[in-house]
Image: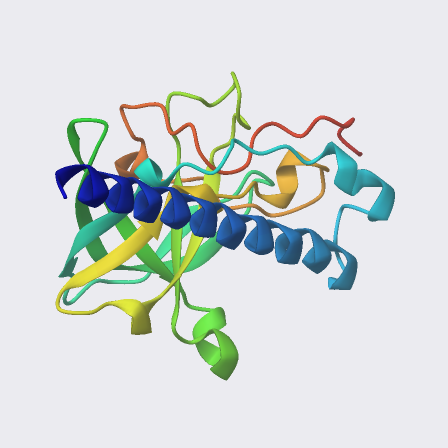
Amino acid sequence: MKYLLSFLLLFSITASAQNYQQTIAKHREAYKADFLKEERSPLKEADLANLDFFKPDSTYRVQAQVSLLNNEKTFKMPTYAGTTADYIRYAKVDFKLNGQTLSMTLYRSIALLQHPQYKDLLFLPFTDETNNKSTYGGGRYIDLDLKTIKNGKIEIDFNKAYNPYCAYSSGYRCPIPPEENDLATAIQAGEKLYKGEKKH
C-alpha cells in the first residue's frame, strides 16, 4: 500500500509538472503572436526565432503577500529614452524564493488607468543578478492583474517575465526598473537575452 501511495504521489507530481510546462508553452506562443498583432512592434515574424527563454520552472512561481500602499503620490519613472512616464506605487509584495525573503513594489500606469481594458493592470519591473549575463541588462517586466489579489496574496510567476521593447530595438520609451525592485538573487526564469541583432 505504501508503494502504491508513493507511486500515485509521484505520478501526480509528474502530471502537474507537465501541465505547468504546457501552460507556460501556451503563454509563450501567445506572447510571440502578440508581436505580430502590435502595430508598433520591433519584431517581425522572422525575428521570433531569436527569442529565447529559460525552461519552465515552477520554483519561480511564488505566492506573495500584498501590502497596499495608501496616499501615494504620482511620480515620474525614468525611461531608457531619457523621458519619463507617470506611475503610482500601488503595493509592496513580500515572498520567499531560493531561500531568501524578497520584497518588491507593484506600480500602476497613470496613462493606462484611463483605458477600461487596462485599468486593473499592475506593472512589475525588476532587475536581478542575471542581467547583462543571461538576460537583458535593462531588466525585465511582469504584468499582473489586481483582480487576482485574493486574501491579501497574489501569484507572481517569473516564468512570465519578459523583455522591454528596448531589448530588441532603439527608439522605445521603456521604463527603467526602480532601485527598490533590484533583486539580490538570480532569477533564472522567463525571457533570456535576445539572440538576434538589435535594431536601430
Left or right position of 25 against 57:
right
Splitting the image into 4 quarters, where does residue 167 fall? Answer: top right
Q: Position of residue 1 (x, y in %)?
A: 14, 44
Q: Is residue 97 left or right of residue 118?
A: left
Residue 161 to residue 121: above or below: above
User: What residue lies at 71% left-to-right and 43% top-to-bottom?
Assistant: 171
Residue 200 pos. (x, y %): 80, 34
Between 193 and 78, the one lying in front of the other is 193
As rendered, which of 187 and 24 lies closer to the eye? Answer: 24
| Residue 141 in the image: above or below residue 31 | above
Q: Residue at x 42, y 27 (%)?
A: 188
Colouring used for the render: rainbow
Q: Nearer the viewer, residue 170 or 164?
A: 164
Query: Residue lying farthest bottom?
Result: 116
Q: Nearer the viewer, residue 36 or 41?
A: 36
List x then y, in percent, for residue 101. 14, 34
Q: How many marks?
A: 0
Residue 29 in sight in this render: yes
- Is there any visible trace of residue 115 in the rendered image? no
Q: Could you say which quadrant of the image residue 17 lies in?
A: top left
Determine the residue positioned at 13% across, 69% down: 151
* Residue beneath the point at 52% across and 19% down: 132
Residue 9 x, y percent position in the rendering = 24, 44
In the rendered structure, the answer to whether residue 104 lies left or right of residue 43 reads left
